Amino acid sequence: MIKVTGIGGFFFRAKNPEALEKWYSDNLGVAMPPKSYDDPVWRQEAGATVFQPFQHDTDYFGDDDKQWMLNFRVRDLDALVQKIRDNGNAVEIDPKTYPNGRFARVYDLEGNPIELWEPGGGDPD
């Protein structure tokens, strides 16, 4: 079967792209986009990726005006949450541990929801 092999980029509009690039780099370690074709790009680790449309009226993303939410896999949720908090951001850790792991929620500078997922209990990688 012919199919795509993965996500090659995630592009979205921002009020202040430069500040948002820096926020993602400082808080989540996502490298800023390369300035030339010779510069390296951010490389993610291979692993499970969920691609799921939600109902248009879901409250899962928080703000009703938000049309998307990123979910990042992490190895150590507690350490990353501490780093993000040390950078002055509020992060909510879901107190429940699910069969597929643990989750936390943070919002970027423009209020976009970011879910952090520490796989566990049969990591689907």
Image (cartoon, rainbow, N blue to C red):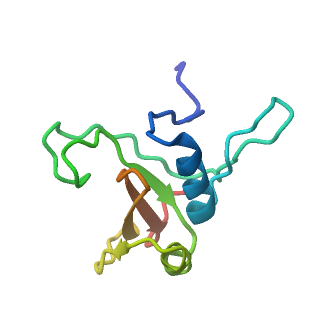
Residue at 44 percent of width and 64 percent of height: 117
Residue at 29 percent of width and 81 percent of height: 95
- Residue 120 location, x and y as percent? 46, 71
- Residue 8 location, x and y as percent? 60, 33
Residue 105 vertical placement versus 93 (above, below) = above
- Residue 79 location, x and y as percent? 56, 80
As rendered, which of 73 and 120 lies closer to the eye?
73
Residue 19 vertical placement versus 10 (above, below) = below
Q: Residue furthest top?
A: 2
Number of labels in the image equals: 0
Residue 13 vertical placement versus 95 (above, below) = above
Residue at 56 percent of width and 76 percent of height: 83
- Residue 43 location, x and y as percent? 70, 47
Q: Quadrant of the C terminus?
A: bottom right
Question: On the image, which quarter does residue 39 sit in?
Answer: top right
Residue at 65 percent of width and 53 percent of height: 45
23 sits left or right of 68 in the view = right
Q: Residue furthest left?
A: 57
